[in-house]
Image (cartoon, rainbow, N blue to C red):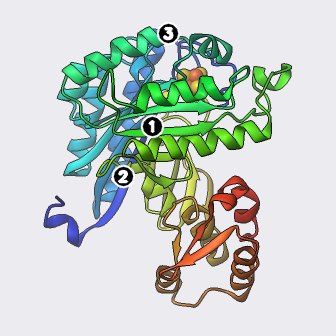
Amino acid sequence: MLSYRCLNLKKISLYVHIPFCERKCLYCDFLSFSASDETKKEYVNALIRQIKKASPAYREYHVMTVFFGGGTPSMLQGQDIIEIMDEIRANFDVDKSAEVSIEINPGTSYDLASYKSAGITRLSIGLQSANDSELQKLGRIHRLKDFETLYEQVLSAGFNNVNVDLMSGIPGQTLSSYENSLRYLADGKDRPRPTHISAYSLSVEEGTPFAAMKLDLPDEDTEREMYKITGDILSRNGYRHYEISNYALEGYECEHNKVYWRRGNYLGLGLGASSMVENVRWKNTEIMDDYIRSDVFEMKNVERLSVEDQMEEFMFLGLRLIKGVSIDSFTEYFHAPMPPKYEQVIEKYISLGLLKKERNCVMLTQDGINVSNMVMSEFIF
Ligand code: SF4
C-alpha cells in the first residue's frame, strides 16, 4: 500500500546500471564488460558520489521503484549492493513498499542474504533457455543446473517475486525445444513457477559477434508460432499477458518497467544510464574512466521533448501494453484530442485487423503484435 505522504509528491523511479559481466554473450550489445575488483570498487564509489550529487534536485519526488540492471549486478559483492541501497535510502525519499529489483546471472556468484538485507524485493534471473546447447550457442556462462541451484536458494531465502528471462529465436532452436523451456518454467510440476516471465525474441544487433556469424536461425513462421505458444502455454498456467513480451501471475507485473511504458519519470544512475524527468531526456557518460573520476556527473545528449515527441512516445510505448492506449488519457495528458493523423492511422489499422478499440482504448490485435514495429512507426510525425 502506498503511504499517505506519497500522494502529495511527484513520483520517480531509479535505474542503477552495473556494467560488469564475466564475459560477453555473443548476441549482447548492452554496455557491459569484464573488470578488475579494483575497478568495481571505484565504480561503486563513483555511484555513491553520483547518488549524493543528484539527489538534491529530486527532493520533491517520491521513489516508487529501484532497478539494478546491467551488465550483471550480481558481479558486485552483496555488501556493495547494501551500501548502494543504504545511500539511495539516505538521499532519496524511497517508498516503504517500493519495488526493488536486481538482475542475477546464474553463472556468477550471488549473495541472496545481502540482497535481503538491502531490501531487494524482486529478483530477475537471466535463464534464456532450459537447453544447455542453446545456452552454449548464445555464449552464456551458465548452464541449466546453475539456474536450478540458484532457483532453489532463491525460494529457500524467501524471495516470492521472481522474474525469469526466456529467449526465442536462438540459433538451432526448434519449436519443441522452445516449448520444453516454456513448460519447464511454467508448468509448476517440479518447482513453484516464477511469478513473472519475460519472453523476448533474439535480435541480432550490428557490431555483435552474432552479426558476423552465419546463424541457423528459426524461420519467420516458426518464430511466429513460438510467440503464439508462449501466450497459450503461459495463459494456461495462470500468467496474464500484459506487455508484448511480458507475462505475470496476478499481482506481479513489473512496476519499474511499467514506468517506462507509461512515460513516468526515471533517473538513471551509473555508466551510460538514461533518464527522463518531466519530458527532458539525457544520458550519463559511457566512458568508464570519465565516470569513475567524475565529481560533476555531466548530463549528456540533453533533449527537451517537443509535444510531438511526447505524443509519439505516448502511442508507441503505450501500444506495447496489451491494455493499449486510453484515448481519454491521451486527451487529458495533452489537453487536446488525438491529432487527425493518429485517427487516420488508427482507422486504417482497425480495418486491416492490426489494431482494435475496446472501452475507448486502442490496442494491438494478435496479428498487430506480429508486426508491431511497423504499426507503431506510423505514429511518428
Ligand atoms: S549477461 Fe547480459 S549484459 Fe552480460 S554479456 Fe550477457 S547479455 Fe550482455
Q: Is residue 289 visible?
A: no
Which quadrant would the C terminus be assigned to in this image? bottom right
Mark nearest the camera among 1 and 3 is: 3
Question: Residue sitting at 34 percent across and 38 percent down?
Answer: 101
- Judge the density around disc 2: few (<14), some (14-19), many (≥20) Cα neighbours within 10 Å: some
Residue type at mark 2 is Glu
Report ligand 1 position as a quadrant. top right
Mark nearer the viewer, 3 or 2: 2
- As shown in the figure, which amino acid type bears the numbered disc 3? Ser
Alpha-carbon distance for marks 3 and 2? 33 Å
* Residue, disc 2: 255
Q: Quadrant of the N terminus?
A: bottom left
Would you name the residue on which mark 3 appears? 36
Q: Residue 122 at x, y = what percent?
A: 30, 37
Q: Nearer the viewer, mark 2 or mark 1?
A: 2
Q: Which residue is mark 1?
A: 295
Q: Earlier in the sequence, mark 2 or mark 1?
A: 2
**Upstream in sequence: badge 1 or badge 3:** 3
For this rendering, which residue is in front, 138 or 312?
Answer: 138
Residue at left offset 58%, top offset 41%: 229
Task: Provide the secondary structure element on which disc 1 rests.
Answer: loop
Q: Position of residue 336 (x, y in %)?
A: 56, 90
Residue 137, position in %: x, y? Answer: 68, 14
Examine the image and state in which quarter residue 221 appears. Answer: top right
**Relative depth, front residue between 274 and 115:** 115
The three-letter amino acid code for the residue at tag 1 is: Asp
Above or below for 323 versus 80:
below
Q: Are marks 1 and 3 in contact (CB under 8 Å)?
A: no
